Structure formats: structure tokens, C-alpha cells
Image (cartoon, rainbow, N blue to C red):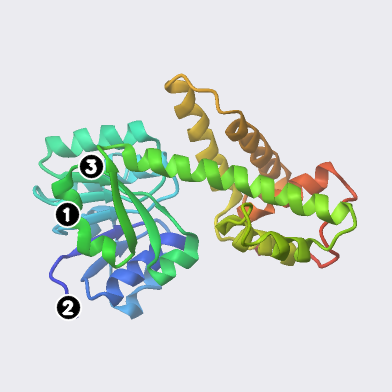
């Protein structure tokens, strides 16, 4: 069914391309832009209009979505070298679905308000599978009126929840990432312990699924560890970025979060040893490196090309 709301998607990488495809399938007219144009061109066959610049993509769109690697990239595309914000029409709605610091979301909201543009910070969780299936958890910060206005857009991509004022969506994503990072570490340690002690780690994983230790991480990433499939998914380098933001945000509000700090150090070591492009379940490899020759199984590692 054709939709009347025109949408621009700035950033069509692993997540953004799948989210844009969901919007196209829902009938929205979509313009796309990416710094690597080839990643945007892949959506042309699905009906997207590919813009030459970020500003051209944003011009005239009723809703402009950014889905970029980090806060500096969002700032650069909107207000820096790419100047997309200057092309966004008064009365439009800007939605940043990237993962970025809460304070940057608040700053961008202030800058957009001065231009007469509504703003939501709406980071997501669910990975490439959730983006493809339209089942993302969407954590939204901002005004209720803007959230209601974005409802049909969000419905095409997943399940939105308004969690508070501007910046709250990014805080919710940090909470999500703290749980993800720490739990990936716990699952990797548990399966490595089982293997080193002589149990079958795949059978141990099956045995504890459905009990109190069960989780989406055990189900999905535990299976990746058993299969030794570390093609991303969610790259470990992004987990470092998110964990660093968690620790910095915690310090800014007077908190010490030792589990998050430990997860950050472990992911930093994984990246330092060449794992930045690996799926974040590859934290197992860092634990195996520290405990060599302990290893889960004998299968070769499946790594990104």
C-alpha cells in the first residue's frame, strides 16, 4: 500500500540498508544516501531514489532518518562537512536511529528546534536479523507529538517505545548494550569453562536454555560461539564504541559500573588483536587467547573476508 510520507535515509550500511528496504516494502517513497554510494545503489532496484549528496537526499523529505556508525559521523553528516541539516525543511521530522551519546542527541535536538524541525533519538536493538524482519526494538527519546507522528515509520521497522525526553532513547540503548556486552562475556566464559572441564559445550547450552540463565544472547550468540561463526552481525568495534560511551556516561552522572568497564577492556583487547570487524560474539576468541590452548571445539573459525 502506497504511503504519503516521504522519507530520506542517510546511511545504508548493514542496518540502514535493511531498514530502508522495510520502508520501501511498506510503501513509503524513500530517498537514500551513503558515503559509499555503492551501498545506496543496491536499494535502487527496490524502488529507492539514490541521491548524490546527503543534502540532496534530505531536501524536501518529511522525515529524515540517520543511521550511521557513531556520534561523530552523525554530527558530520547533519551539521558538519555534509550539511544535511541545512537542507531539511522547516516542519520536517529528523530521527537519529544511530547509537550516539545522549548529550549529542540533546544538542542536535536544540539545533533542530532552532530551525523549526522536530527531533527524535531512536536507536535500535535486534541486529541485522531484526532490521531485515522488521522486529527491531526501537528506543525513542523526544516529545510525544513527534513520536506519534513517527508511528507509521517505526511500525515498518519494529516495536517503538517512548522512554522519555530527548536523550532517553540513547540512554536506553546504552542500558541495552551494557546487558548485551556483559552477557556475551558471561556466555563465552560459561561455554569455555564447560569445554575445558570436559563437558560438551553445545549440550551444556541446550541444557541451560529455558532456565534462569537463558537469554537471547545465549540463544543467538551462544550458538555462534559453538559454530565458531564470527561474521557480523554486530561488529566488535561498535561494541567498543558503545561500551566506552556507557562508561563515560556513567562517570558523568557519578556512577562506577565495573562490569561494563571490564567488558570494555575485553572488547578493546579483541579489537587490538585484529577482531574489530568480527561479530561481537567473537569475544570468545579473546578469552581463548588468554586461556590458550583452551578452545570450544575443533572447527575452523568463520571470519569476515
Describe the element under mark 2 as helix, strand or loop: loop
Which of 34 and 105 lies nearest the eye of the viewer? Answer: 105
Binning the other alpha carbons within 10 Å of mark 3 as few (below 14), some (14 to 19) or many (20 upward) gives many
Residue that label 2 marks:
2
**Residue contact at pointers 3 and 1, CB within 8 angstroms:** no
Residue that label 1 marks:
148
Describe the element under mark 3 as helix, strand or loop: loop
Q: Quadrant of residue 30?
A: bottom left
Q: Which mark is residue 142?
A: 3
The quarter of the rendered structure image containing the N terminus is: bottom left
Query: Which mark is first along the chain, 1 or 3?
Result: 3
Report if residue 3 is visible in the image.
yes
Mark 3 vs mark 2: give the one in front.
3
Residue 42 x, y percent position in the rendering: 40, 73
Which of 68 and 35 lies nearest the eye of the viewer? Answer: 68
Residue 221 x, y percent position in the rendering: 63, 59
Query: Which mark is first along the chain, 1 or 2?
Result: 2
Query: With 221 as the anchor, is 41 left or right in this view?
Result: left
Residue 151 x, y percent position in the rendering: 21, 59
Q: Which residue lies at the image location 81% right of the left edge and 49% below the top edge?
A: 193
Query: Which mark is first along the chain, 2 or 3?
Result: 2
Q: Is residue 243 above or below residue 95?
A: above
Query: With 137 as the anchor, is 247 left or right in this view?
Result: right
Binning the other alpha carbons within 10 Å of mark 1 as few (below 14), some (14 to 19) or many (20 upward) gives few
**Residue contact at pointers 2 and 1, CB within 8 angstroms:** no
**Residue contact at pointers 3 and 2, CB within 8 angstroms:** no
Amino acid at each position: 500500500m502506497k504511503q504519503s510520507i516521504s522519507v530520506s535515509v542517510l546511511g545504508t550500511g548493514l542496518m540502514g540498508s535493511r531498514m530502508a528496504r522495510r520502508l520501501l516494502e511498506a510503501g513509503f517513497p524513500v530517498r537514500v544516501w551513503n558515503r559509499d554510494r555503492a551501498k545506496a545503489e543496491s536499494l535502487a532496484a527496490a524502488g529507492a531514489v539514490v541521491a548524490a549528496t546527503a543534502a540532496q537526499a534530505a531536501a524536501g523529505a518529511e522525515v529524515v532518518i540517520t543511521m550511521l556508525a557513531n556520534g561523530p559521523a552523525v554530527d558530520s553528516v547533519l551539521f558538519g562537512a555534509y550539511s544535511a541539516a541545512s537542507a531539511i525543511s522547516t516542519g520536517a521530522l529528523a530521527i537519529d536511529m544511530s547509537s550516539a551519546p545522549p548529550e549529542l542527541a540533546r544538542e542536535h535536538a536544540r539545533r533542530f528546534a532552532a530551525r523549526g524541525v522536530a527531533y527524535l533519538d531512536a536507536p535500535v536493538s535486534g541486529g541485522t536479523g531484526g532490521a531485515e524482519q522488521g522486529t527491531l526494538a526501537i528506543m525513542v527519546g523526544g516529545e510525544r507529538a513527534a513520536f506519534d507522528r513517527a508511528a507509521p515509520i517505526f511500525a515498518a521497522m519494529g516495536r517503538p517505545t517512548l522512554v522519555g525526553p530527548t536523550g532517553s532513547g540513547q540512554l536506553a540503548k546504552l542500558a541495552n548494550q551494557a546487558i548485551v556486552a556483559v552477557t556475551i562475556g558471561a556466555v563465552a566464559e560459561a561455554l569455555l569453562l564447560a569445554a575445558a572441564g570436559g563437558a560438551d559445550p553445545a549440550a551444556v547450552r541446550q541444557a541451560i536454555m529455558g532456565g534462569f540463565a537463558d537469554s537471547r544472547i545465549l540463544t543467538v550468540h551462544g550458538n555462534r560461539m559453538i559454530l565458531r561463526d564470527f561474521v557480523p552481525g554486530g561488529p566488535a568495534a561498535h561494541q567498543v564504541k558503545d561500551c566506552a560511551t556507557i562508561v563515560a556516561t556513567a562517570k558523568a552522572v557519578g556512577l562506577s559500573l565495573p562490569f561494563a568497564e571490564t567488558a570494555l577492556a575485553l572488547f578493546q583487547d579483541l579489537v587490538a588483536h585484529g577482531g574489530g570487524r568480527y561479530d561481537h560474539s567473537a569475544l570468545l576468541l579473546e578469552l581463548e587467547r588468554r586461556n590458550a590452548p583452551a578452545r570450544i571445539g575443533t572447527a575452523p573459525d568463520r571470519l569476515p573476508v
